[in-house]
């Protein structure tokens, strides 16, 4: 079955928000990032600043050299996050299959949608106008049969663009596409391809799977597929986790406190593994104890700092255990749950934010 995929990406996201909130920045080259004469970089910049060759990840120093009159603004991540939540809310009106890639962009699978709208193009238009209405910001959207083509399409006519590549136009669109526009072909590969005479999709399409693998290794196979418009990756909705935990039903009911602590240590280690694997840390630790007669109690503590290590967890759990009758009464189940979670990406963001301030 042919899918209907939309990719939405906000235009000059941080910079547009700054221009929206500060009228004197409008129509001016605005750079969001650390100030020049430091080791900071540009997070993003307004389209007026892009004319000077300024772009994300460039050093603030270089940006200042390219455009001395540019206005440097420190990022306000809280505001960006709030706008991000506003736009996600709009996406969920149409489908639960929303895969955010960052604060300002997401894939949507609208093959089936909550409003039973046949046309993905109509949905993209509705989303764009609602974003404009609610946030006073513009987004660009790409509509096509898979993630790869939708992503390339959303970038095709920025800002405030809407590019639709219907199924029968995918091949010709990719054949004519400049290789620098292929999402996933980086600067280094682009240079290598140009040296080989590959400038557009149609040149890339001439190479066999073997030739592509020889020249580009593993990713050669990926190029072989995308240039033919083949990408069957599903849109993976990401559910925000509220808590993370683990529990153990004991083989025999026990009352030995040392044994109880040992079991809780094992659970803490498992939780440390899960937390680190998923990049989480948490503020609230909850201990669950089920007594022999099935009566279940929980005890919680909320710290004023985040933890994710087994030692920290077991320290809190040992304290909580004192507020139960475990040991005096026989126990049949023990569990630990971590909540008030924060992802490390968020922490990184906060650290980044303090670097800028
Ligand atoms: N960002 C960042 N550092 C980067 C790239 C991006 O901090 N190296 C931040 C700032 C951007 C936001 O992420 O505003 C979204 O990234 P995009 O790549 O979508 O860039 P923009 O939305 O700013 O511009 P465009 O209109 O090209 O999408
Ligand atoms: Mg963007």
Image: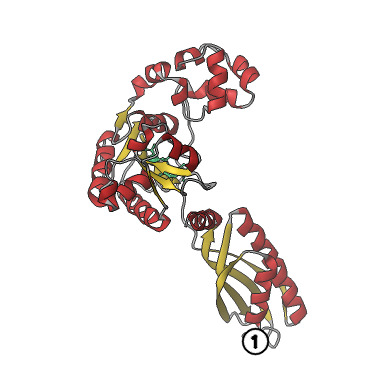
Task: Give coordinates of residue 57: x percent, y percent.
Answer: 50, 40
**Disc 1 residue lies near ligand 1 with CB under 8 A:** no
Above/below status of 277 relative to 184: below
Above/below status of 61 relative to 205: below
Q: Image check: 257 left or right of 54?
A: right
Name the residue nearer the viewer: 278 or 343: 343
Task: Give coordinates of residue 47: x percent, y percent.
Answer: 34, 36
Q: Residue at x 24, y 36 (%)?
A: 122
Quarter of the figure that contains the N terminus: top left
Number of callouts: 1
Q: Image check: 303 left or right of 132?
A: right
Can residue 122 be seen? yes
Q: Image check: 262 left or right of 231?
A: right
Q: Residue at x 48, y 32 (%)?
A: 232
Q: Quadrant of ligand 1?
A: top left
Name the residue nearer the viewer: 291 or 239: 239
Crowdedness near tag 1: few (<14), some (14–19) or many (≥20) residues, C-alpha within 10 Å: some
Task: Give coordinates of residue 308: x percent, y percent.
Answer: 62, 64
Q: Name the residue under label 1.
A: 325
């Amino acid at each position: 079955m042919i899918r209907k995929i939309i990719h939405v990406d906000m235009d000059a996201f941080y910079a547009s928000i700054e221009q929206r909130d500060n009228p004197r920045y409008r129509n001016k080259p605005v750079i969001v990032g650390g100030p020049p004469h430091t080791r900071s970089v540009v997070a993003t910049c307004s389209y007026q600043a892009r004319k000077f060759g300024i772009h994300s990840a460039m050093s603030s120093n270089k940006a200042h050299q390219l455009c001395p009159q540019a206005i440097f603004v420190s990022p306000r991540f809280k505001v960006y996050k709030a706008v991000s939540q506003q736009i996600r809310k709009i996406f969920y009106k149409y489908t639960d299959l929303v895969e955010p890639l960052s604060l300002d962009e997401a894939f949507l699978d609208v093959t089936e949608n909550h409003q039973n709208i046949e046309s993905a193009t109509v949905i993209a238009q509705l989303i764009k106008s609602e974003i404009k209405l609610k946030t006073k910001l513009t987004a660009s959207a790409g509509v096509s049969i898979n993630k790869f083509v939708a992503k390339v399409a959303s970038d095709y006519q920025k800002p405030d663009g809407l590019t639709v590549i219907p199924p029968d136009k995918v091949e010709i669109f990719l054949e004519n596409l400049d290789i620098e526009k292929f999402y996933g072909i980086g600067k280094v590969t682009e240079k290598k391809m140009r040296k080989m005479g590959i400038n557009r999709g149609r040149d890339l399409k001439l190479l066999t799977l073997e030739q592509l693998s020889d020249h580009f290794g593993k990713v050669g196979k990926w190029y072989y597929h995308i240039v033919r418009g083949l990408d069957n990756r599903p849109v993976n909705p990401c559910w925000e986790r509220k808590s993370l935990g683990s529990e153990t039903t004991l083989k025999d009911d026990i009352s030995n406190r040392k044994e109880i602590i040992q079991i809780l240590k094992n659970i803490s280690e498992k939780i440390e593994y899960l937390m680190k694997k998923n990049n989480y840390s948490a503020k609230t630790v909850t201990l669950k104890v089920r007594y022999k007669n099935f009566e279940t109690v929980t005890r919680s503590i909320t710290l004023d700092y985040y933890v994710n290590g087994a030692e920290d967890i077991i320290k809190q759990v040992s304290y909580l255990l004192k507020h139960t009758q475990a040991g005096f009464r026989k126990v049949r189940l023990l569990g630990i749950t971590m909540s008030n979670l924060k992802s490390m990406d968020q922490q990184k963001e906060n650290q980044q934010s303090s670097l800028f301030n």
